[in-house]
Amino acid sequence: MPYLALRPAVRLLLALIITILLFATVARAEGKWPMTVKDAAGREVTIPAAPKAILLGSGFNLVALSLIHPKPVSLLAGWSGDMKGDLAILANWQADTEPGQRAIDYLTSTGVPVIVVDFNSDPLKSTADMMRLLGRVLERDDQAEAFARFYEDKLALIRSRVAAKPEPRPTVLMDAFPKPDRCCWAYGVGGLGEFLTIAGGRNIAEGTLPRPGGTVSAEAVIAANPDVYIATSSPGGVYSGFSIGPGVARDEAEQTLAAAVKVPVLSGIVAVESGRVHGIWNFFNAIPLNIVAAEAFAHWLRPDIFADLDPEKSLAEINERFAAVPFEGTYTVSLGADTPR
């Protein structure tokens, strides 16, 4: 659910699509090529020449490229029907599937090196390193290093403050794509859920659900009675009545979030009664902008030590310093008084 809220057949189709294919130029840059790198799966991959054009199958990793390249779209060569070239980049959630493994086997058998990147299964450990990896293969080392250090500095600040004052640790439910007719798909302690823990919260799914998360019953939510409720969703309420993300106005995000927590199972929990209700764009879980989510969680969960953190300000800084195209819309929202505005 948190990765792709799509029908199983569509998810399978997407898993068969190569996320990004980069075609190398004939000429090799002196001193760098061929280049051998280690990817997120621990595989050593040799790239024969500098990648210059991209064949894109899924948009998530274009976000990462846009943070280190001023014109990422200029690199696009087409779509995944053209399968010949010198480099393929897969997201880890694709590479971990059987169709993904078949794609890797096929590409490598035809002489196409394959790199796996990970921005979701272990984001705290891998995000900065994945940016450095992409910077290296795209010859954008300085830009990638600048973003990686920006990311690491913000993460270190969150860790240090929580370490200095670990209590209180409010309980929290992060509910993916809330719907009025069912409850609830809760994020676990992996992926984006890791940021709840480092931000000083106690995820009610910890110890009861698999690492990625899973379905919890209404009874379990009521029994846990979380102090903080966070909903995740996407623009337009396609998979949920709650609408948030690129192109979404703040009023729309606020109104749809308010409607989402009026259902009986949520309306009586302490988080809703006390006004600690928040929402965030779900697909922070698949891109290096997850640091914005980390700051939002810290501000919401521990306002006593993170009152000065402003995820909207951080996103504005990312737009100014790194993004080839600005990220516009509403990415975080709250029904309480502690929303960074």
Image (cartoon, rainbow, N blue to C red):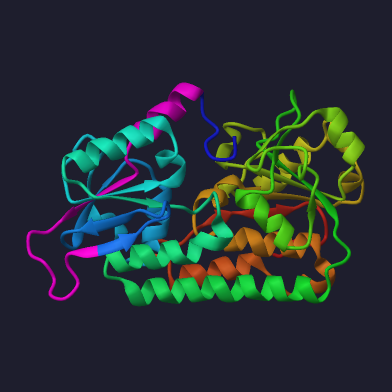
Q: Quadrant of residue 31?
A: bottom left
Residue 325: percent from left, percent from top = 40, 61
Residue 166: percent from left, percent from top = 83, 68
The residue shown at (82%, 55%) is 336
Report if residue 14 is visible in the image. no
Image: 320 above or below 109: below
Residue 160: percent from left, percent from top = 72, 76
Image: 271 above or below 134: above
The residue shown at (37%, 42%) is 58
Horizontally, is 31 left or right of 72 in the view?
left
The residue shown at (76%, 29%) is 183
Report if residue 316 is visible in the image. yes
Q: Is residue 283 magenta?
A: no
Residue in the foreground of this view, choosing between 231 and 15: 15
Residue in the foreground of this view, choosing between 12 and 42: 42
Q: Is residue 19 magenta?
A: yes
Residue 246: percent from left, percent from top = 52, 50
Q: Quadrant of the C terminus?
A: bottom right
Which stretch did the figure color magenta? 8-35
Residue in the foreground of this view, choosing between 256 and 302: 302
| Total count of labels | 0
Q: Quadrant of the N terminus?
A: top right
Horizontally, is 150 left or right of 136 in the view?
right
Q: Quadrant of residue 162?
A: bottom right
